Image: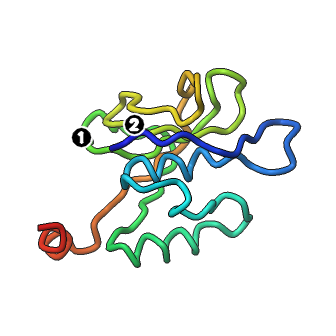
């Protein structure tokens, strides 16, 4: 995981959403932010997200609620109200620990409403392609 910071900032008075989710995906996949689409800029963002992940050998697994991720020793995106202003926000976690907040000066989330896990479609093929 290489920390990437968001470049667009949303908020209660903003007409467009920030790109914290995009920055989290870029951080976990160790990509420049401009190589990750701003999925949340449209209402129908899940199908494009799934297609983009599938092209790269991954499947995003969206999990509602705050499951016991302390068992999960992997980077993933956690979403919920931001600690600073209560607006919807995304951060990178590993287990239940905050690994990276893409908002400069950000303080994480006040609670977790959902998580996005990154699952390899075929772990054996994924492992061979990285070797």
Would you place residue 49 above or below residue 77 in this image?
A: below
Gap in Å between the C-alphas at discs 1 and 2? 9 Å
Question: Quadrant of the rendered structure where residue 107 is?
Answer: top right
Count up the numbered dots.
2
Q: Secondary structure at mark 2?
A: strand
Residue 30: which disc? none
Instruction: Specify whether 20 is left or right of 1.
Output: right
> Residue at the spot x=49%, y=46% of the render?
24
- Placement of the N terminus among the 4 image quadrants: top left
| Disc 1 crowd, CA 10 A, few/some/many (<14, 14-19, 20+) | few
Does residue 128 appear left or right of residue 99 in this picture?
left
Residue 131 placed where, x, y %?
Answer: 11, 67
Residue at 66% x, 21% y: name it.
84
Comes first in the chain, label 1 or label 2:
1
Q: Is the Cβ of the residue at disc 1 closer than 8 Å to that at disc 2? A: no
Residue 79 in picture, x, y percent from top left = 55, 41
Question: For mark 1, what is the residue?
Answer: 73
Classed neighbour count for the residue bearing mark 2: other residues with Cα under 10 Å, few (<14), some (14–19), many (≥20): many
Secondary structure at badge 1 equals loop
Q: Give x and y (percent) for residue 61.
A: 42, 60
In this view, the residue in front, 115 or 33, is 33
Quadrant of residue 82 within the rendered picture: top right
The answer to whether residue 62 is left or right of residue 34 is left
In the depicted structure, whether residue 116 falls above or below residue 102? below
- Which residue was labeled with disc 2? 93
Q: Residue at x 38, y 49 (%)?
A: 28
């Amino acid at each position: 995981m290489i920390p990437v910071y968001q470049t667009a900032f949303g908020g209660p008075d903003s007409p467009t959403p920030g790109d914290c989710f995009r920055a989290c995906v870029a951080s976990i996949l160790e990509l420049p932010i401009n190589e990750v689409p701003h999925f949340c800029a449209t209402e129908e963002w899940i199908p494009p997200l799934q297609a983009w992940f599938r092209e790269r050998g991954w499947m995003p697994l969206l999990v509602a609620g705050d499951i016991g991720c302390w068992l999960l020793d992997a980077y993933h995106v956690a979403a919920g109200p931001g600690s600073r202003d209560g607006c919807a926000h995304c951060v990178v976690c590993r287990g239940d620990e905050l690994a990276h907040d893409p908002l400069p000066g950000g303080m994480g989330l006040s609670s977790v409403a959902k998580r996005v896990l990154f699952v390899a479609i075929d772990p054996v093929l994924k492992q061979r392609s990285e070797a």
